[in-house]
Image (tube, rainbow, N blue to C red):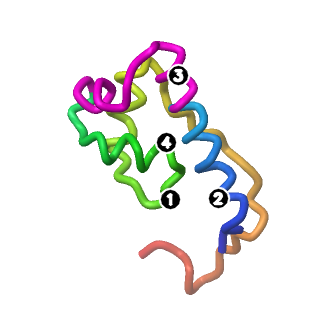
C-alpha cells in the first residue's frame, strides 16, 4: 500500500505548481476555471491539495495553464506479484 504521507506531499507539489503557474500568468482562479471549463471550486480544491480530484479536470486545468503531467517509472518497492494478484 502507498505511503499516505508521500502521496500527500506529491499532491501538495502539484497544488503548488498549479498555484504558482496561475499567479505567474496573473490569472484569478475564476479565469482558470473558465479556460479549463471546470468550476472555480475545483480550481480551489486542486490548489489546496485535495487528494481526490478527477483526472480529466486536472488535465484540463494543466492544459489551460500550459502545464503537462508526466508519468515516470519509479521504484517497485512494496509491489508484489503472486499467483493470486496476477491479472485474469
Q: Name the residue under label 2.
A: 7
The single residue placed furthest to the top in the displayed view is 25
**First along the sequence among labels 3 and 1:** 3
Q: What element carries label 1?
A: loop
Q: Are marks 3 and 4 in contact (CB under 8 Å)?
A: no
The majority secondary structure of the magenta stretch comes to: helix
Residue 6 vertical position relative to residue 41 in the rendered view, above or below: below
Q: In which quarter of the image is residue 81?
A: bottom right
Q: Is mark 4 on a helix, strand or loop?
A: helix
Give coordinates of residue 83: x percent, y percent: 60, 83
Give coordinates of residue 67: x percent, y percent: 48, 23
Q: Mark 3 points at which residue?
A: 21
Q: Are marks 2 and 1 in contact (CB under 8 Å)?
A: yes
Q: Is mark 3 on a helix, strand or loop?
A: helix
Q: Residue at x 24, y 39 (%)?
A: 38
Q: Are marks 2 and 3 in contact (CB under 8 Å)?
A: no
**First along the sequence among labels 3 and 4:** 3
Q: Name the residue under label 4.
A: 47
Amino acid at each position: 500500500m502507498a505511503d499516505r504521507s508521500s502521496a500527500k506531499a506529491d499532491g501538495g507539489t502539484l497544488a503548488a505548481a498549479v498555484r504558482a503557474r496561475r499567479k505567474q500568468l496573473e490569472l484569478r482562479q475564476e479565469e482558470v476555471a473558465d479556460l479549463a471549463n471546470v468550476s472555480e471550486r475545483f480550481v480551489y480544491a486542486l490548489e489546496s491539495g485535495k487528494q481526490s480530484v478527477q483526472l480529466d479536470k486536472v488535465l484540463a486545468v494543466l492544459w489551460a495553464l500550459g502545464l503537462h503531467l508526466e508519468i515516470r517509472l519509479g521504484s517497485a518497492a512494496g509491489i508484489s506479484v503472486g499467483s493470486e494478484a496476477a491479472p485474469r
